[in-house]
């Protein structure tokens, strides 16, 4: 039996077990499974959040279902008021942001929402004792204070241009959250928010269930019960959708194409900032060699990966920013040039051995590339990348593992990573490339350090002048081209398949995180049944 046959058989067997389990969990009357009506919705996603507390980073991109931020994004990713009554008033020096807050808003437990909850949320995130890996995103914030119950004022250390984008961050209930340990307490799994839905259950590794908030300030949602099934394996998710166990799901493009002519389902393709890249850690003697990194950048056939792996649902990537972004540095696109890749390696002393794999100073040009188990898209990217690298004489051993297994190995081993956030270039470039982010959670996984990149990213995030920012980001991207710490492969479209029962479905330009808050259900609270 071939490895491919074994994988297929295993996936089929796993799917059968999951379907039997799902049938038991979703028996008539329990309210969790997909229904024949339009007031319940069950969707399948690949990942679940580590926490449901915004104090630890949950929902920072918006659309968290349980919470609201001061601002939110509309379908075109423009900022709009949420818990604030309007966009902020910004001082001339760009360092003071004032928000007026909605009156009469309550948390799901009936307690009133006030400016004190906003102050508590931001101050707690910035507290050194809080284990929020994303607190660096609020580096510009100096202080936040309440002016009465319905006004809050933020003071910045420097004029951080995209600060308003950071205020889509969900607001926690001070009355509830402050009574528990911020890192380990019950608020992480039983949160109280102001959002359109209330969490009713969370079976870790299986599903999250929600019910409509009848007192939501934006109006009671027509979808009364919302269930998010957590199914890491792409094949299993497709099987459960096909069986009717799910109303909708995110699928790799090659699996979604089977539903193209299904009259009972709709397929959505969302443009994203979501990229796939290979980390090339500097501490590894092979991937830390700039010649190897430059050669891999040219040896990979990005267009072929888009065509074969993504079925055309995406585009080549040459850095964190998509090529259609106004911030992308034109001219930094890298061609597929295997001959040049080989010459770079030859000139650097990496000579082919008898088996075609290169050697230098007694060291073989070989390293390990990890991807998350069950993630077919990352697996296919990794295998395609390894195949292209071998043509240049570099041997890559592709391995699957869990997050817990992979994370400790990344100072030496490579990983097929994903990331991306569309709101502002700082959100992608700084955590991925700035040397200050090395070892900070899942940031800068390549342990990348380039003086020019650091300087330009600092300049860009501390200026409100768009021309200054654009020039700095261009210089940073051109420095990255010369000294690639990653091999960026593709920007992928997110493809969703969903039952054709509702109207008002749209997609936004999506971030990498495409679980509860993204997909056509980003605004599920606004859906209407088809007439």
Image (spheres, grey):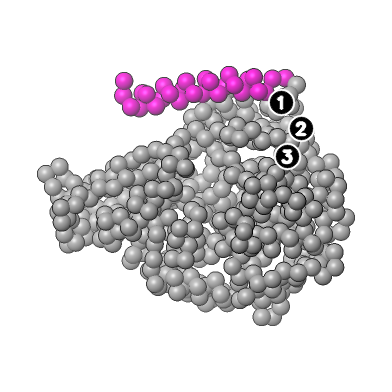
Q: Residue at x 88, y 55 (%)?
A: 104
SS label for mark 1: loop
Mark 2 and mark 1 residues within 8 Å of each other at the beta carbon: yes
* Quadrant hosting residue 33: top right
How far across and how far down the image is residue 19, in percent?
57, 22
* Looking at the image, residue 283 lies above or below residue 467: above
Magenta stretch: give its range. Answer: 1-28
Return the residue at label 2: 39
Q: Residue at x 62, y 45 (%)?
A: 51
Disc marking residue 188: none
The residue carrying pointer 3 sits among few (fewer than 14), some (14 to 19) or many (20 or more) residues within 10 Å by Cα, namely many
Disc marking residue 199: 3
* 44 to the left or right of 434: right
Q: Is residue 368 located in the magenta-colored stretch of the structure? A: no
How far across and how far down the image is residue 210, in percent?
72, 37
* Looking at the image, residue 232 lies above or below residue 296: above
Closer to us: 330 or 409 = 409
Return the residue at label 1: 35
């Amino acid at each position: 039996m071939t490895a491919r046959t074994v994988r297929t058989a295993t996936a089929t067997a796993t799917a059968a077990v999951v379907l039997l389990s799902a049938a038991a969990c979703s028996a008539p009357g329990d309210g969790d499974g997909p229904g024949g009506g339009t007031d319940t919705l069950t969707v399948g996603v690949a990942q679940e959040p580590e926490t449901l507390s915004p104090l630890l980073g949950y929902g920072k991109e918006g659309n968290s279902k349980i919470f609201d931020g001061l601002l939110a994004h509309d379908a075109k990713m423009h900022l709009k008021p949420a818990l604030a009554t309007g966009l902020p008033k910004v001082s001339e020096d760009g360092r003071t942001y004032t928000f007026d807050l909605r009156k009469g808003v309550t948390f799901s437990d009936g307690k009133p929402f006030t400016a004190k909850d906003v102050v508590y949320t931001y101050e707690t995130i910035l507290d050194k004792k809080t284990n929020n890996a994303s607190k660096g995103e609020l580096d510009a914030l100096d202080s936040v204070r309440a002016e009465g119950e319905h006004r809050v004022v933020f003071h910045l250390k420097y004029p951080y241009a995209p600060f308003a984008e950071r205020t889509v961050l969900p607001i926690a209930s001070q009355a509830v959250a402050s009574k528990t340990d911020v890192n380990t307490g019950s608020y992480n799994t039983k949160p109280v928010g102001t959002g359109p839905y209330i969490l009713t259950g969370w079976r870790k590794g299986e599903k999250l269930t929600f019910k409509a908030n009848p007192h939501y300030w934006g109006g009671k949602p027509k979808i009364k019960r919302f269930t998010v099934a957590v199914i890491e394996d792409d094949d299993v998710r497709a099987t459960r959708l096909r069986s009717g166990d799910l109303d909708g799901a995110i699928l790799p493009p090659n699996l979604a194409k089977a539903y193209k002519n299904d009259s009972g389902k709709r397929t959505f393709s969302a443009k994203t900032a979501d990229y796939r890249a290979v980390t090339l850690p500097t501490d590894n003697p092979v991937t830390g060699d700039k010649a190897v990194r430059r050669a891999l950048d040219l040896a990979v056939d990005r267009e072929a990966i888009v065509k074969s792996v993504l079925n055309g649902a995406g585009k080549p990537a040459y850095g964190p920013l998509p090529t259609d972004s106004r911030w992308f540095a034109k001219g930094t696109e890298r061609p597929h040039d295997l001959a040049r890749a080989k010459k770079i390696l030859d000139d650097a002393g990496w000579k082919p051995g008898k088996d075609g794999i290169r050697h230098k100073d007694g060291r073989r040009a070989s390293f390990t590339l990890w991807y998350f188990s069950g993630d077919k898209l990352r697996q296919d990217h990794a295998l395609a990348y390894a195949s292209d690298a071998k043509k240049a004489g570099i041997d890559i051993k592709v391995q699957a593992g869990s997050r817990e297994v992979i994370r400790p190995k990344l100072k030496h081993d490579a990983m097929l990573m994903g990331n991306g956030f569309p709101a502002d270039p700082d959100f992608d470039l700084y955590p991925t490339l700035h040397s200050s982010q090395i070892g900070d959670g899942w940031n800068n996984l390549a342990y990348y350090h380039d003086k020019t990149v650091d300087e330009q990213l600092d300049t860009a995030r501390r200026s409100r002048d768009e021309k200054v920012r654009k020039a700095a980001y261009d210089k940073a991207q051109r420095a990255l081209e010369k000294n690639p710490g990653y091999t960026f492969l593709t920007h992928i479209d997110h493809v969703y398949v969903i039952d054709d029962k509702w109207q008002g479905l749209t997609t936004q330009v999506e971030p990498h995180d495409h679980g509860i808050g993204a997909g056509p259900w980003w605004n599920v609270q606004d859906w209407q049944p088809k007439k």
